[in-house]
Image (cartoon, rainbow, N blue to C red):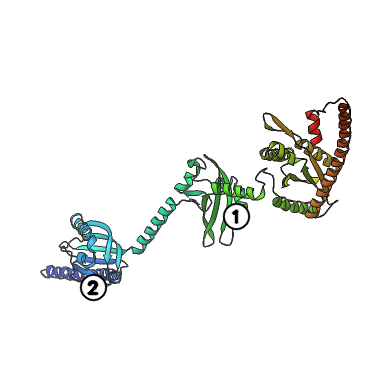
Amino acid sequence: MELIPVVALLIVMALWVIHSVVLNRRLIESQNRYLQFFKDSPVALIVIDKEYRILEWNQAAEIIFGWSAHEAFDRDIIEFIVPSFDKAHVLSVLQKGALEGVSHSKNYNVTKYRDELFCEWRNRLLQGTEGNILCIAQDITTSKKTLDDLNKRSTALESAGDAILYTDDKGLIEFANRSFFLLNLGDPDDVYGTHIGTYLFKERLTFTALQSQFDTNQTWKGTITKSSANGKKVLSVTITAIYSHHHLISYIANLHDITQLSCRVDALAHRAHHDPLTGATNRAAMDDRLNHAIERAERASHQIALFFIDLNDFKNVNDRYGHEAGDRLLFEVARNLRECLRTSDTVSRYGGDEFVIIIEEIRNQEHIETILKTIEVAIHKPIFIDSLTTLRAKASIGMAIYPNDATDAKALIKAADKSMYAVKREKNNSHSVKQKTLTESVLTLYADNHSRQNKPTLPDTLAEECTQ
């Protein structure tokens, strides 16, 4: 019976020994795992004491900072890897970790090769030690550079002089910069979430059709006109489709206000194609339009009527009333001609007091006669020079028909010119007969008066008629 307690005691002791061996083995395994984790961690793990001197330094720390564990051991971490301008900041962060148990920071560090890094740090007080701190560091230099680049690009985007917007993968507007809103194209609240096609081109279908015009760089360039709070704006637009792995992720649109430039270009183009005095098409532009009209008429088997107009006795107007009156007469005649014809018809000042009119898609002879009558009425409208002077222009009008009279522009003009001179000769002949009759009457009147010893006096109206 006395052996039972002894045996029990031996069993307990044996179990305790076995338990201790197992616990010790587990502790060793845990320590080995910790050491392996500490060694192989992808982030820098550094253990420092309460004086901030380095106790442990893993392989990631060697890779990031360049020093081996042997070189780093017992070095003051602040003096060792922190640049002078960041030392005070890092010291305050470590002090906070020692007091509160944990601290975080982002600061600059230096490597063995004097390269500058930007690292994110997490510091944790190790329990059961005499103030040791585990410092976990990750190199975020590349991330910071990327973030800085994004910030710079964002600032540049926001402050750009051109209006810029971009969309999501569905074409819905996600962002527009300040310059875009300065265009005042509409309610700012209606921009975000609106489809780019609806906002810029009114119709989403229009934008869908536009996508077929994107070039090999997935870019479309063109000009649009938009209403704004300040009136119509002409915008030069560049739209680029952004793809990632063959999937559309965004549209980026750049809009540049060219309203003033467009007005200047339009003015220059107008000057290049129009007579500066009358505003009618000039001779060069008329030649171009006539050639295009003949091409269209040839394709569609249509006729063209070309009227060649010469104002009668225009020199007399300049001599009697002055050149300003002559210029006013030319201007008003040209305006009256444009107003009585279609916008598709061409009224051109051919030179001096000559005009050419091009009428496309002539239907029949009756149509031609109607146009001719309309032109004559327009030319003969009263033109007010001043409060005392009103003029009515008269003209000789020749006409040629494509393709009856000629099949090319030069020949058609020549035929109409020839027709005009024929009309002018006929008028001159008629005028000569009338003047001869009038002269005979005057001479008879003079003979009668002479027999009475009186000097003949012609009425003013008769004198003007004789001058004409």
- The circle drawn on residue 9 is none
Vertically, is 232 above or below 147?
above
Quadrant location of residue 433? top right
In terms of depth relative to the viewer, which is nearer, 259 or 237? Answer: 259
**1 vs 2, front mark:** 1
Residue at the (21%, 75%) spot, across then down: 70
In terms of depth relative to the viewer, which is nearer, 343 or 146? Answer: 343
Question: Counting other residues with Cα less than 10 Å from the Cα at mark 2, is it few (<14), some (14-19), or many (20 or more)?
Answer: some
Q: Tag 2, which secondary structure?
A: helix
Question: Is residue 280 in sight in this rendering?
Answer: yes
**Image quadrant for the C terminus?**
top right
Disc 2 residue type?
Answer: Ala
Vertically, is 463 above or below 24?
above
Q: Is residue 201 left or right of residue 13?
A: right
Vertically, is 439 above or below 145?
above
Q: Residue furthest left?
A: 2
Percent x, y of residue 381: 74, 34
Percent x, y of residue 246: 54, 61
Percent x, y of residue 422: 85, 46
Q: Is residue 98 left or right of residue 33?
A: left
Q: Tag 1, which secondary structure?
A: helix
- The circle drawn on residue 69 is 2
Question: Counting other residues with Cα less than 10 Å from the Cα at mark 1, is it few (<14), some (14-19), or many (20 or more)?
Answer: some
**Image quadrant for the N terminus?**
bottom left
Percent x, y of residue 176: 47, 48
Label 1 to label 2: alpha-carbon separation? 60 Å
Sequence order check: which comes first, mark 1 or mark 2? Answer: 2
Query: Which residue is label 1 attached to?
Result: 211
Disc 1 residue type?
Answer: Gln
Residue at the (61%, 56%) spot, across then down: 213
Question: Is residue 345 in sight in this rendering?
Answer: no
